[in-house]
Every structure is written in structure tokens, then in C-alpha cells.
Image (cartoon, grey):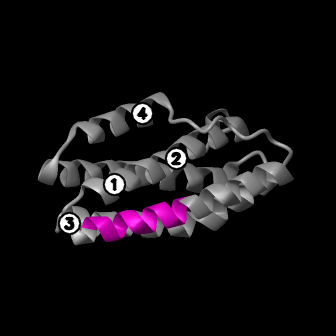
Amino acid sequence: MAPASRVTSSSFVAMAASANLFEIESSQLALQRSQSAKVKDFAQHMVADHNLAASKMKQALSQANIAAPPEKLGAKDQQTYDNLKAAQGAAFDKAYIEAQYNAHVEAVSLFRSYAQDGDNPRLKALAAELLPTLQGHLDQVSKLRSS
């Protein structure tokens, strides 16, 4: 990876924080709206795991003396969340699974890239620590997507 394409700590933190918040909020919505036990089970795991990830991120930011980003969705994540809120029934489940799949493909790529080439040692360690969990989520949602 060329140095010019490296993800800086500030952009990593902003993207990771928005993605993590999206996972929590969209999964809470799935717990309310979904009629599928499999989707609700997955959503419950997302809420628990991503709340833990948020806590670990706050701790890492504190240790790295980096200010935490605002707790709000980025524009892309907000648009996806708004689209989910508009969906009902089976269409909701399909949209939620697709949104989770896309979000985890992006998160795995972001965390893998930052774990390898990040510019802050504490955040690199966090990215490496959380990467296996994110990959596991991607594997789970891929199975849901194909069933």
C-alpha cells in the first residue's frame, strides 16, 4: 500500500466510530422490527459486540490522547439507516442483512488496512484486536444473506 493511500488516525477514528454506531443503531432497529429469529439473534450479537467495541475505542483514544469523535452517524451511514427505517416486514430483514453485509465488508477492509499501516500504535493494536470479531460478523451475515 502506498503511503499516500494510508488511512490517518483521524479518518480511521471517524469512519470506525460512525460504522460502529451504525451497527448498534441499525441492530436495535432490527430487534424491534424483524420477525425473523435468526435476524434478531444476529442483531443481538451486533448490539453486544459493537457496544464492547465502542468501549474499547474510547479507552484506546484516551490512552492515545486523541479526542473522541462526535457520537453521530456519518452521511453514508445515516442514509442507509434512514432507508432501513422506511422498510417493513420481509423487506426490512432483507435490507438489514444487506446493510450489515456491506458495512462489515467495509469495516473489515478498514480495520485490516489500519492494523497493517496505521499511523498510531495504540489504534493499530485496537484495529488488530477487533479485526477477528468483525471478520466473524462478516462470516455470520454472509450465511444469513445466502439462506
Question: Which one is earlier in the sequence, the residue at label 2 or at label 4?
Answer: 2
Q: Is residue 118 above or below residue 82?
A: below
CA–CA distance between discs 2 and 3? 23 Å
Q: Please tell me how crowded label 4 is: few (under 14), some (14-19), or many (20+) other residues with Cα within 10 Å.
A: some
**Mark 3–mark 1 distance (CA, rounded to whole Å):** 17 Å
Q: Secondary structure at mark 4?
A: helix
Q: CA distance from mark 1 to mark 2?
A: 15 Å
Q: Residue at x 35, y 51 (%)?
A: 29
Q: Residues within 10 Å of mark 3 (few under 14, many from 20)?
A: some
Q: Nearer the viewer, mark 3 or mark 1?
A: 3
Looking at the picture, does residue 73 appear above or below residue 103? Answer: above
Residue 143 seen from this side: yes
Which residue corresponds to mark 2?
Answer: 21
**Residue 40 on the magenta segment:** yes
Q: In this figure, which residue is indicated by the disc labeled 3?
A: 36
Label 2 neighbour load within 10 Å: few <14, some 14-19, many 20+: many
How much space separates mark 2 and mark 4, taking CA atoms?
Answer: 10 Å
Above or below, 140 against 107 in this view is below
Numbered mark located on residue 78 in the image = 4
The type of residue carrying mark 4 is Gln
Identify residue type, mark 3: Ser
Query: Cβ–Cβ below 8 Å for labels 4 and 3?
Result: no
Q: Which mark is residue 101?
A: 1
Q: Is residue 64 left or right of residue 104?
A: right
Q: Is residue 6 visible?
A: no
Q: Residues within 10 Å of mark 1 (few under 14, many from 20)?
A: many
User: Residue 131's spot in the image, x, y percent?
Assistant: 56, 63
Could you tell me which secondary element the residue under label 1 belongs to? helix
